Image: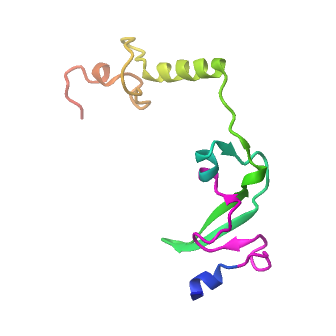
Amino acid sequence: MSRIRAAFHDPEGTRYGIPTFWWKGAPPGYATRRQLRAAGLRPGGQPVAAQILWRGVGGTRTAYLYRVELARPKRIATPAQRRAIDAALTARRTCRVCGVVRPYCIPRSLGECVDCAYPEGVAP
């Protein structure tokens, strides 16, 4: 085992407070939030079960691990919530001046679409 791996190997949690493993060294049954999300799961309120430490740009990096068997299925938005999200996103794309729904979000700095803000077609 290399010195870097040995520095981050603490499966009992005596050095770091929780079980700690090196990069790609966690045993099966643990997953990060992204891995849970990819599997259609969420942590479901459980505390962090372990961590992974590795040396990266800017110092030591950390990834928290959760137990897969305690994870719950992801919640799905209701039809009413989906309608509300669609309405909010449409409002962000609608120009207040001309009322046209644009294929991009209206810049908050302008408060109107680019065509209304720069009618000559010349942006500063």
Report if residue 16 lies within the magenta region.
yes
The quadrant the N terminus occupies is bottom right
Q: 70 or 44, which is in the foreground?
A: 70
The relative height of residue 92 versus residue 42 in the rendered view (above or below) is above
Tell me the colour scheme of the image: rainbow
Q: Is residue 94 above or below residue 39?
A: above
Q: Is residue 18 left or right of residue 86?
A: right
Is residue 38 rendered to the left or right of residue 108? right
In the rendered structure, which segment of residues is drawn in magenta? Answer: 10-34
Task: Decide: is 69 above or below 85.
Answer: below
* Residue 23 magenta: yes
Is 98 on the left or on the right of 59, as rendered? left
User: Residue 16 appears in which quarter of the rendering?
Assistant: bottom right
Res. 2 image quadrant: bottom right
Q: Nearer the viewer, residue 121 or 6?
A: 6
Quadrant for the C terminus, please: top left
